[in-house]
Image (cartoon, rainbow, N blue to C red):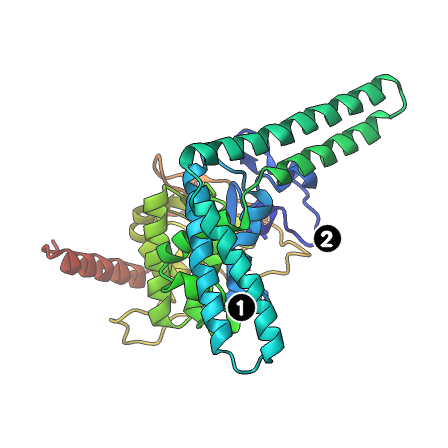
Amino acid sequence: QTSRAVMGILAGNAIIQGGEVIYEGRDLLKIPEDEFHKIRGNKIGMIFQDPSSSLNPIMRVGNQITEAMILNGRRKKNKHKDYIEASMVEVINTKIEIDELKANKEISSENKKNELNKLKNKLKKAKQNLKVSKAEAIVKINKEYDAYKVQYKKDRKELFQSLKNKSLNISDFKSKLSELREAYLRKIKVTKEEAKIEAYKIMSEVGIPEPEKRFKMYPFQFSGGMKQRVVIAIALMAKPEILICDEPTTALDVTIQAQILDLIKKIKRDRNLSVIFITHNLGVVANIADRVAVMYAGKIVELGTADDVFYNPRHPYTWALMASMPDINSKDKLQTIPGTPPNMLYPPKGDAFSVRNEHALKIDFELEPPFFKISDTHYAATWLLHENAPKLDRPHVIDLRIDAMQKEIARIRGGKHE
């Protein structure tokens, strides 16, 4: 639910009782919905667990990839190159459509003739656009922008005058000004061809082969791994600064999971993205995370770098997770965490993990522990770290796991484990 709160997509009956989500100096929980769309997708993107439920089954994937860019993506300056490139793509696509139509034996001759005429006219226009010089393209686009800008300023001036004459109240003025602004922005946003060109690039970037061909396909024609690549492409189209990945590999088989994880790491590196990765799989965490937050009952109980958490875990819940994690050296029966998670409609008193914690102290059932500082990068919320708490060594199985991890890393790096 935390990620959904960040994205502003909580269920209608959800209640936020407290806390803040600060992004660029603003609390996202207090931003009205009519402003949030500038952040959702554009600044913060999200990839969900099941790619099939994220895609519209009756809509071509290309349209789903370009939809947000067409609605929200504004044109950049000096788009004459893309203007000409778009015409080239239009020529190629139209030629393909003509070839496909000629080969189609299910369409009657009369209908085929009409459709061919339409496509030939479309091809002729696209070829004419190719003949436009760069200078003429600049003039054409700038003229288009200027016309929109002049009309927008005129309409806005009339709105201010109506407010001044008191023929329009302040509430209606704000509403109409917002509508006017949105209408203006829609007019200067990218064309379908510009969005298509960008989609081809991003589809190639996320490893979707033959993007021109697959652009026209439906989700059911893709494998699970390819669907998730489409979902990632959709998230990247708006060029977000933060990408939230909510269990993005759970619905995929192990081989495809590894491919998607490698892809996300590559995208993070190439695009300088901040990635928030939500998962129950500690192996995935070890593979992808720089910093780790271990959560229980909706709250962070341990926070640190990946090395802090994996090599020096301090919270009993982190111990329990690591003890229950299988690895290639596991021979004995895996440990399990006793009991069940608490019902958060009726939050437990004290430490939420206390009833399942064999190391719980009496105070755990009375007071919720604060965060205790272990190092400048490492914190844990457990009374076991209090100066007056009894000294307790972590379970021996955790030491065995840590030793095995260090040996495996040393083996992979070709070094010697000391």
Q: Quadrant of residue 38?
A: top right
* Amino acid found under the numbered disc labelled 2: Gly
Q: Secondary structure at mark 1?
A: helix
Residue pointed to by mark 2? 12
Q: Quadrant of residue 34?
A: top right
| Mark with earlier residue (1, 2) | 2
Which residue occupies the extreme top position in the image?
164
Identify the residue at horizontal 56%, vertical 82% (top origin): 106
Report the side of 50 relative to 309 (left or right). Answer: right
Is residue 129 among the parts visible in the rendering?
Answer: yes
**Relative vertical location of residue 404 with respect to residue 304 in this rendering, above or below:** below
Q: How many dots with numbers? A: 2
**Relative vertical location of residue 262 with respect to residue 80 in this rendering, above or below:** below
The x and y percentages for residue 157 are 75, 21
Q: CA distance from mark 1 to mark 2?
A: 23 Å
Residue pointed to by mark 1? 52
Q: Give the camera-side residue of 104 and 308.
A: 104
Q: Give the camera-side residue of 3 and 96.
A: 96
The x and y percentages for residue 67 are 57, 53
Q: Secondary structure at mark 2?
A: loop
* Amino acid found under the numbered disc labelled 1: Ser
Q: Give the camera-side residue of 396 and 177.
A: 177
